[in-house]
Amino acid sequence: MKVKDLLVQRLGRVDYEDALALQKETEHAVQTGKQPGTLLLLEHPHTLTIGRRGNHAGILMPPESLTARGVTVFETNRGGKITYHGLGQIVGYPIINLSPEREDVHRYVRDLEEVLIRTLADFDIDAFPIKGLTGVHTQRGKVAAIGVHIARWVTTHGFALNVNTDLSFFDLIIACEGEPVTSMRELLGHEVEMKAVEDSIIKNFVDVFEM
């Protein structure tokens, strides 16, 4: 799907390792000008990812117990500490070239937050950033996490928005900042159509990043 200057790939369920390989391949294509800026939208099976500021001490369950629950663990080069990915969560990996107009890491993260805040507003959810923290928050807890990596001003990794996520899996980790975690389903009191949320993310991404 091509939206103006953005290629959008809706991939459904993708194992984390496969998504890493696809990001690397896409990053190279964007860096060399063979592919336009790309937004990957997908879901992961139960996965814990550890960012550059995290470590295995943030996992509260032994490896054999994680395996029994079908949870895999990956160390990554994204920013942040440890987070959970799972079904019912929309993960977005924007792979775009910020050069030359947007060579500002902090602005990029704030823009991702703005995309998600506008998306949540489309579903009548009041969400906001918190100064000094990364991600998107509500009065009932954090609803989206952000962790990025930028090389030669091309972005990888991205955001995870809890839509219909089973929040009990967050009990496996020490969540960033110790803040409660919530989801769109919990905030609205009903299941939310994933495609409708993806549609909103795409619209708002194009608007915020002027693509």
Image: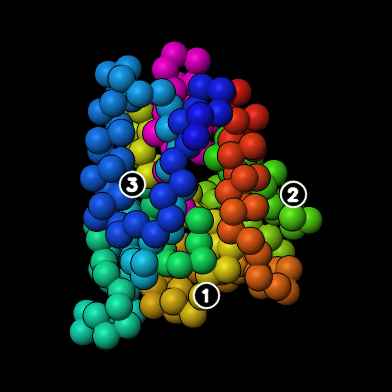
Q: Nearer the viewer, residue 49 or 200?
A: 200
Q: Quick one: quadrant of the C terminus?
A: top right
Observer-side mark, 3 or 2, equals 2
Q: Residues within 10 Å of mark 3 (few under 14, many from 20)?
A: some
Q: Which residue is mark 2?
A: 122
Q: Residue at x 30, y 74 (%)?
A: 71
Quadrant of res 185:
bottom right
- Look at the numbered disc 1 and give the secondary structure of its residue: helix
Q: CA distance from mark 2 to mark 1?
A: 22 Å
Q: CA distance from mark 3 to mark 2?
A: 28 Å
Whether the residues at callouts 2 and 1 have beta carbons within 8 Å, the answer is: no
- Residue 209 percent coordinates (x, y): 57, 27
Q: Nearer the viewer, residue 7 or 107?
A: 7
Q: Is residue 103 magenta?
A: yes
- Look at the numbered disc 2 and give the secondary structure of its residue: helix
Whether the residues at callouts 3 and 1 have beta carbons within 8 Å, the answer is: no
- Which residues make up the magenta segment? 91-110
Q: Which residue is mark 1?
A: 167
In this rendering, the answer to whether 24 lies above or below 153 is: below
* Number of marks drawn: 3
Q: Which mark is residue 195?
A: none
Q: Residue 136: tell me if it is visible.
A: no
Q: Residue at x 30, y 59 (%)?
A: 15
In this rendering, the answer to whether 132 lies above or below 8 is: below
Q: Amino acid at mark 1?
A: Leu
- Look at the numbered disc 3 and give the secondary structure of its residue: loop
Q: Which residue is mark 3?
A: 78
Which of the two labelled residues, at mark 3 and mark 1, occupies the earlier sequence position? 3
Q: Amino acid at mark 2?
A: Asp
